[in-house]
Image: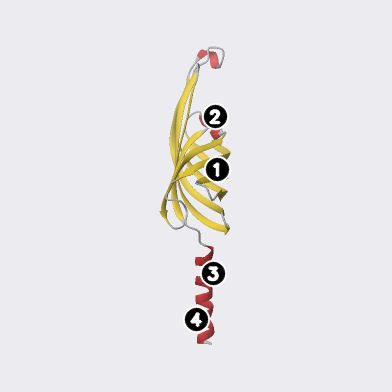
Amino acid sequence: MKNFLITGIIVLIASVSINAQEISKNALGLRLGDSDGFGAEISYQGRLSANNRLELDLGWRDGKNYDGFKLAGLYQWVWNIEDGFNWYVGLGGGLGSYDYNDNNFNNGNDFTDTFVFAAGDIGIEYNFDIPLLISLDFRPEIGFGDELYDNNDLGLDIALGLRYQF
């Protein structure tokens, strides 16, 4: 019985290590989604360990009647599905600020807000043989600010990520 238990533990450890795929040390690119009005984000991923990484995203908008920025940081756990396919989950948060001024809206008053938010993340990615990583993720956010998300503190974001790995 003791030998059977030891053999089972060794097989379990070997199967986990066979399925483990090392994630890229660095990845830089774009995360293309709604991001609650902030549009495309510049995205950086840095490996922390064999199966964990930190993702930092910066989105900004600038126009005639508005400007703003949003910075998000997420700690992610990455698991291999098969070959170059991985799935991941993450937790984090961020901060942002925006200013909106349109004389034909809200009696000409400015909407200005600085906010913080907590975020989750779940997604799938494919690591090509070339240094390209493509991903699709869903990021719900719970924000805390005066005028955030049209007076609704929940933001839902789906995005496509394209990143160069180095």
25 up-or-down from 58: above or below: below
Q: Amino acid at mark 1?
A: Arg
Q: Is residue 99 visible?
A: no
Q: CA distance from mark 4 to mark 2?
A: 55 Å
Q: Residue at x 55, y 38 (%)?
A: 154
| Residue placed furthest toward the left | 48
Q: Which residue is mark 4?
A: 6
Q: Which residue is mark 3?
A: 15
5 up-or-down from 101: above or below: below
Q: CA distance from mark 4 to mark 3?
A: 14 Å
Q: Secondary structure at mark 4?
A: helix
Q: CA distance from mark 4 to mark 1?
A: 41 Å
Q: Position of residue 72 (x, y in %)?
A: 45, 39
Which tag, 4 or 1, sits closer to the chain's start? Answer: 4
Q: Position of residue 97 (x, y in %)?
A: 44, 29
Q: Residue at x 50, y 59 (%)?
A: 21
Q: CA distance from mark 2 to mark 1?
A: 14 Å
Task: Give the colour scheme of this rendering.
Answer: secondary structure
Q: Nearer the viewer, residue 126 or 118?
A: 126
Which tag, 2 or 1, sits closer to the chain's start? Answer: 2
Q: CA distance from mark 3 to mark 1?
A: 30 Å
Q: Position of residue 132 (x, y in %)?
A: 52, 45
Which tag, 3 or 1, sits closer to the chain's start? Answer: 3
Q: Secondary structure at mark 2?
A: helix
Q: Which mark is residue 139?
A: 1
Q: Nearer the viewer, residue 161 or 100?
A: 161
Q: Which residue is mark 2?
A: 37
Query: Between tags 4 and 2, which lies in front?
Result: 4
Q: Amino acid at mark 4?
A: Ile
